[in-house]
Image (cartoon, rainbow, N blue to C red):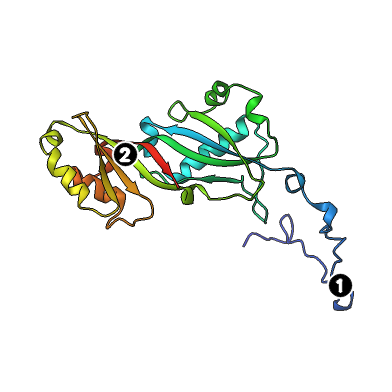
Amino acid sequence: GVCDNKQIFNILTEVQPQDQKRILTRTEINLDEDAKTTSERAPRFCFRLQYTKRGDLKYLGHLELAKIIHRFLRRVRAPFVLSEGFSPKIKASFGHALPLGVESDIEFLDLWLTRSDFFETKPLAYFNLNLPQEIQILNVTGLDMSNGRGLSLQEGISSMTYRVTLDEEQKMKRSEIEANIQAIGGLTIDPTTNPDVVLFTQETQTKLPQKFSELIPSIFGKTYLNELAIIKQHVTWV
């Protein structure tokens, strides 16, 4: 079609004779020990970040949230560690994915850096200025990795507590709502003196009979999670 053999033509290469082909040596393809990247040789320090996810960002999925965090790390020039392999990624580990439509005051992220003092070089307010207002870092803790990584975030969190602010119709059905929650394995009601809210805890090791995003709205007489004023406010560690 596009080749007219005058102005447009194919560029062909000569086929190498079979007897001249050979396998490259390890040194020629640069796979010796000295060829490792700086990221592989550098020391690694693990930090646990606690952050919020509020407002309209409750509609962002887990993958979109990860992209925001990765852009933030590049913006503040964080000395992050890259994973190995053909497609290196920033070495970070998120906790349990937050259901779409749920806000949170207590999300966690494990992040590997090559500097132990990076978060001490600037105040926390500087890092938060480089994040959306709905995502703010509350605390940074260095983890002791001398005895190995230990439990991951998903393994280390045994339960998560949610707060639902009731509307007028739900307040009239509060007893029925609490009874429905208690009847489901893996969910328990937490005591509260506030008549306008319901607190319940989800055990992470117990599988719910339905998806969280389908089960919880139905208990409160709604169709979708984003119709509820729901926020994750506490976690319990193993």
Extreme residue toward the right, this view: 20
Position of residue 211 in the picture relative to residue 3 (left or right) = left
Mark 1: give few (<14), some (14-19) or many (20+) Cα within 10 Å. few
Position of residue 200 in the picture relative to residue 36 (left or right) = left
In this figure, which residue is indicated by the disc labeled 1? 22
The answer to whether residue 108 shows anywhere in this view is yes
Residue 59 x %, y %: 37, 39
Extreme residue toward the left, this view: 172
Residue 47 x %, y %: 59, 38
Marks 1, 2: nearer the viewer: 2
Position of residue 151 in the picture relative to residue 234 (left or right) = right
Q: CA distance from mark 1 to mark 2?
A: 64 Å
Position of residue 82 in the picture relative to residue 129 (left or right) = right
Label for residue 205?
none
Q: Residue at x 84, y 58 (%)?
A: 32
Q: Quadrant of residue 4?
A: bottom right
Most foreground residue, 150 or 45 = 150
Q: Residue at x 57, y 34 (%)?
A: 141
Extreme residue toward the bottom, this view: 19
Q: Marks 2 and 1: in contact by CB < 8 Å?
A: no
In this figure, which residue is indicated by the disc labeled 2? 162
- Label 1 element class: loop
Q: Quadrant of residue 134?
A: top left
The three-letter code of the residue at mark 2 reads Tyr
- Label 2 element class: strand
Residue 24 x %, y %: 85, 67
The three-letter code of the residue at mark 1 reads Arg
Most foreground residue, 49 or 75 = 49
Q: Residue at x 68, y 61 (%)?
A: 3
